[in-house]
Amino acid sequence: MTIDPWVQREFYGKDGFPTFVLGESSFTKGKHGKRGDPLPPDWNQRIISSFLENGNDNTIKRMMDVFYDAPPLDREEHRKFWQSTVFANFIQTDMGEPGTPKTSEDWDGGKPVFHRYLRELQPQFILAVGFELWDNLPSEGRQEHHFGVRPPKGPTGKERPCLLYPNGNGQSFVCGIRHTSQGFSPKIWRSWVKHSIEEAHRLRQFI
C-alpha cells in the first residue's frame, strides 16, 4: 500500500515552482500497529492536518523555518505554506518507537513510491530531511549536481552536492539537510536551502 502525499490544489500556484518536503518515516508508539505494519494511505495528510490544527510539532516547524529569513511563523503562515507545499515520508511502514533503527528493507520499500511521487507531482524542488534519507535515495535516474566555480558550503563547512531526478516533465532538484528533530538549528541551514532554491530556479530555465 502506498501512502498518499499531503497536497493541496494551490500546490502548482506557488510562483509556478512546486515544492516538496520529503521526510524520513513515522512512528506511532503502538497506537496504530506494530513495527513494520503498513500505515494508512492518508497518513501524510493526517500529519499535516494535525499540525495545522495544533501547531505543536517542532520537527515540522523546523522543516518550514529553513524556507524563511525571519521565523517564527504564525498560524496563518503555516496554513499558507502547506497550501503550496507537498509533504510525504519516504518509508511507508510504521517504525513503532522513536529511535528504532531503519533496515535496508524499510528504505527499499520507499524507493518505488518516491519515483511515483516524482511522476505524479512533478515537483521542481525537493527538500530531503535527514542525512540517512539522503544516503538512501534511489540510485535509479539520479544525477549529482554541483554548483559551479564557487559553490555555497553547507553548515558542515564542505561543499554539498544536490541531486537531479527525472520526473516526466523535466527534472526535480533535491537539496538535503540534517534531520529537523531535537538539536536542529534552522538558522544555520537557511542560507544553504536558499542557495539551493535559487540554483533550482536557474536550472529550470535550461531543463
Image (cartoon, rainbow, N blue to C red):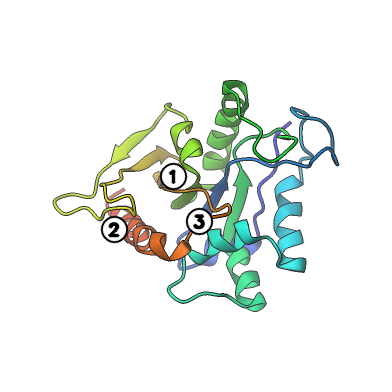
User: Would you call the spot at circle 3 few (<14 residues within 10 Å), some (14-19), or many (20 or more)?
Assistant: some
The residue indicated by pointer 2 is 202
The amino acid beneath tag 3 is Phe
Structural distance between the alpha carbons of marks 3 and 1:
34 Å
Question: Eyeballing the image, is 15 above or below 101?
Answer: below
- Amino acid type shown at disc 2: Arg
Q: Residue reaching furthest front?
A: 183
User: Residue, x 27% and y 53% (percent of image)?
Assistant: 153
Q: Residue at x 62, y 27 (%)?
A: 106
Q: Helix or strand or loop: what does disc 1 sit on?
A: loop
Q: Is residue 107 left or right of residue 199?
A: right
Q: Amino acid at mark 1?
A: Asn
**Quadrant of the rendering where the N terminus is positioned:** top right
Numbered label tally: 3
Q: Which mark is residue 149?
A: none
- Residue 112 image point, x, y percent: 57, 29
User: Where residue 146 sits: x, y (%)?
Assistant: 25, 44
Q: Earlier in the sequence, mark 1 or mark 2?
A: 1
Q: Residue at x 71, y 62 (%)?
A: 51
**Badge 1: how crowded within 10 Å, few (<14), some, or many (20+)?**
few
- The residues bearing labels 3 and 2 have C-alpha atoms spaced at a distance of 28 Å
Q: Earlier in the sequence, mark 3 or mark 2?
A: 3
Residue at the spot of label 1: 169
Residue 20 in the image: state x and y as whole percent: 53, 52
Q: Which comes before the other along the chain, label 3 or label 1?
A: 1
Q: Please, what secondary structure does the residue beneath circle 3 have?
A: loop
